[in-house]
Amino acid sequence: MFKKILIANRGEIALRVIQACRELGIRTVAVFSTADRDSLHVTYADEDVCIGPGPSAQSYLNISAIISAAEITGAEAVHPGYGFLAENASFADALKECKIQWIGPGTDSMRLMGNKSQARQTAIRAGVPVLPGSEEALGSAAEARALAGQVGYPVILKASAGGGGRGMRIVQGPDELEQQLQTASEEASAAFGDGAIYLEKYLVEPRHIEFQILGDCYGNVIELGERECSIQRRHQKLLEEAPSPALTAELRHQMGEAAVRLARHVSYENAGTIEFLLDRTGRFYFMEMNTRIQVEHPVTEMVTGVDLVKQQLRIAAGEKLSVAPGLHSRGHAIECRINAEHPVTFRPSPGKILTFHPPGGPGVRVDTHAYEDYVIPPYYDSLVAKLIVHGADRQEAIRRMERALDFFVIEGIDTSIPLHREIVRDDRFRIGDVSTRFMERFRPQKTKSAPVGA
Ligand code: ADP
């Protein structure tokens, strides 16, 4: 096992990795921007290195500063967390050249699955169902028009290099197509440095269901069940749960098997997630793969009892998978993402936290880097805490989440706590009748022709 690793991230996920390292006896190096000097990941790491000013392009995305920090401190490996450089294969390659281990998958599978349109083709080759759409990135507006006509409107245009709910546009009819394609391509070039766009059928009220995968370097690949992430705003997840109330044992088996088949097809190592859309008739379609730990990994940890971050460290250190396939999950877990944002307008609300009382008690877990008097910097994403509960069944988990939300006091900034209270009290949510358009009932959003994403 490693003696010392560097964590190329901040916030709650940096702390989460530190917790796993402590339990495994691994020393930790935190990197931080000048805006994060007072962050808990800096306090709890064994060593820390300042890598630049607040804006992430100059700090958390600064590859040479991070590699220098690893070399100076003698870190043997780097954990990237999620976001920032977590899916950047060039960063992983650069580390390899410096003889520093990447705590993540091989760069071939990162490149293959990191490009959404290539990932789609790979899924087809692995015999995993995808939505009708383009085989490759679109060559011209005429090609897009012909294809959209074939698959039928509405269709969704997606940036091949996109992610994080950004770079997607829904097209309702042929008269909008050309304009939307041009705008989508321009936006994708600006945001991701790659204007390639592909097209697929837009499902009107699907559920988002994803499978957690673990693979080791001996070719063992397992799945640890699903997470339902249908409660989203602007195509970004807000609340996740495991297991999904929509899956029968048979469907769970089929989807899990498809996820493992795809991961095996790309010789996947380490933790990853295969995302599917499920339609009302029970048909499922591969959407994309995330080649890293996910924000919502704790719900899987709660129902399986497997520490996914420790597994990532063990796999990267060359250990054989110690989790047996066919693991049974226990009870029900729900996660609410508590964001520093206005609960109605979703406007970010950085600033000083004046009061911070997280809930506790049976079955409650809070993953956070926040504390009283902590100042949330304006530069990064708005996640302040993840509130996770575990109950014997879904009903108990919902009641427990209601109670935990009521006992969570954050003052000084706006948060999404009031919104989560509304969601968990909703009748449709309580019977598990949800889709990715669930939030439109609370917060009407423009879907027609409007850009989707942040
Ligand atoms: P990102 O990588 O940017 O998060 P995804 O491809 O994972 O993008 O899609 C994010 C969300 O967008 C999904 O959870 C779903 O709500 C919506 N979405 C994506 N593709 C489709 C589709 N073909 N039909 C309906 N909704 C879709």
Image (cartoon, rainbow, N blue to C red):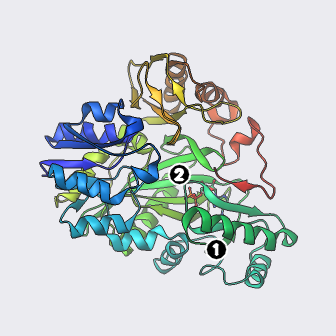
Question: Which class describes the residues within 10 Å of circle 2: few (<14), some (14-19), or many (20+)?
Answer: few
Rendered location of residue 153, percent (x, y): 79, 68
Q: Secondary structure at mark 1?
A: strand
- Is 7 on the left-hand or right-hand side of 425? left
Which label's residue is closer to the chain start, 1 or 2?
1
Whether disc 2's CB lies below 8 Å from ligand 1 is answered no
Q: What x and y, as percent, mark residue 155?
A: 74, 67
Residue 177, how many percent across, how many down? 80, 71
Of tags 1 and 2, which is closer to the observer? 1
Q: Three-letter amino acid code at disc 1? A: Tyr
Residue 318, image quadrant: bottom left
Some atom of ligand 1 lies within 8 Å of the CB belonging to the residue at label 1: no
* Residue 149 figure quarter: bottom right
**Residue at which label 2 appears:** 248
Q: Mark 1 highlights which residue?
A: 198
Element at label 2: loop
Instruction: Name above or below for residue 192 compared with residue 366.
Output: below
Q: Does residue 159 appear anywhere in the picture?
A: yes
Q: Residue at x 41, y 72 (%)?
A: 111
Whether tag 1 and tag 2 are in contact, CB under 8 A, the answer is: no
